[in-house]
Image (spheres, rainbow, N blue to C red):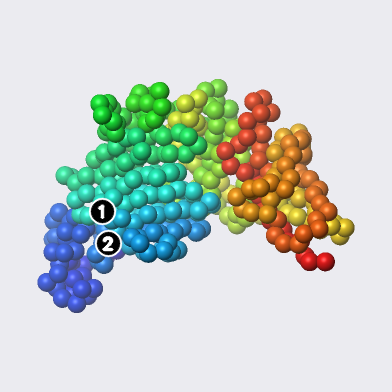
Amino acid sequence: MVRPGDTLWDLSRQYKHSPLHWQEIQKDNAVRTPERLKLGQVLLLGGAVAIVSELAGSAWIKRGNTPQRPLARGAGVQPGDVLVTEQDAFLSMTLADGSHVVMPSSSALKVLAINGQLVRFELLNGRLESHVEKQNGKHFEIRTKSAELGVRGTYFRVRDEDNVVAVEVIEGKVAVGEVAADPRNLLLGVARGSLLAGSDAMQSCQLLPAPERLESAIDGDILAAPMAEASGYRLQLARDDRFLQLIHEQISSQPRFILPDTLAPGFFHLRLTALDQRKLEGLPSDSTVYVAASASRRSGVENLGDGRYKVRWPGRSGQKYRFELARTTEFSPLLAEDSAFYGNGVTVGPFAVPGKYYWRSVEIDSNTGDLAAAPSFSGSFEVPAP
């Protein structure tokens, strides 16, 4: 990180053992005026032009023919790399020009090209949120299975999740071009979005406005004002106001979220968005929230002593959940499943086979019968050998 008095000449001498390599640092980091370094700018000195600057949870990198390995904060990113975030993991990359790319959980990205003049990513699945600085002659591109996106400086999302491929622009403009024999082109401005696949693809649509947050209860509930056009809502929590240090997110069919008991108490930055009927995600509303160390946010399992176990979660009375039990994290095959009006728990067993068991409860929309996109609560427990 550039500090007062730093020069490329001195940094080259310090980190590359000779001041004569200063032009390599300039090229790798796309520094336009070597004599005027920007204080706080991140310079990448090891040949890479992007680094993993933030990481919460588990993420992996696959490079060439080598086996995949865990990613760590500070790791460099190279052309050909494939990055993967696991469920409940969040990764941010910092590029040489100060741009940032955020990979929320369950996302996969391939680096097609990355140097001082061109950055090109391919979104394999999941989501990317990009904060791109003005490119000044350089190129920043993201490819999906059906379209290519190019920007000159903007904040936008690209998504390929739950059978929806879409782009949404929060700031600036994004140029969209189809990957097809007779491609269509589209220029999206602020608060506009488009599906990138399907019969309604390549149509500029107005994004839903930011949801209005109503209250944050001490038991961990986050509430928003219902929006007639919304088909669902997303919540994100981060440690910073730019949401580069994500720590948690949820999707709900209702404008209500119950925070998990795994969150440490304290203040966090909160972001709420609404998804329309096309599943385009709208503009964000940002605020701060205090998460209390409340017992009512806790899920748990109690051994009843007769081979049965009581599973509980902080659900509300009258809310319908689908409960599932399995021996694998993929929940296949299922050992038990049930949908009922459980307020906050269910009793399972008795169990004859020792080992680890996994459970989850998924909220069900009482009007449509649809399942929420992600488990509302989940956990595991061990059944000891007799």
Pick the residue in front: 81 or 116: 81
Q: Residue at x 13, y 64 (%)?
A: 23
Residue at position x 74%, y 39% in the image: 338
| Image quadrant occupied by the C terminus | bottom right
Q: Tell me the kind of residue under disc 1.
A: Ile
Tell me: 354 left or right of 154.
Answer: right
- Labels 2 and 1: the sequence-earlier one: 2
Q: How many other residues sit within 10 Å of disc 2, few (<14), some (14-19) or many (≥20)? A: many
Which residue is under mark 2? 48
Residue 166: quarter of image: top left
Question: Residue 209 at what x, y percent from top left?
Answer: 45, 28
- For the residue pair 63 and 270, the one nearer the viewer reads as 63
131 is higher (above) or lower (below) than 77: above
Q: Is residue 208 left or right of residue 2?
A: right
- Residue 215: name its quadrant: top right
Distance CA(mark 2)–CA(mark 1): 8 Å
Relative to 137, say whether 201 is above or below: above
Kind of residue at disc 2: Ala
Residue bearing mark 1: 114
Q: Secondary structure at mark 1?
A: strand
Compared across the picture, whether 368 is left or right of 44 comes to: right
**Residue 120 coordinates in the image, percent (x, y):** 27, 47
Disc 2, SS = loop
Looking at the picture, how far across and down is residue 11, in whole percent?
21, 70
**Residue 307 appears anywhere in the view:** yes
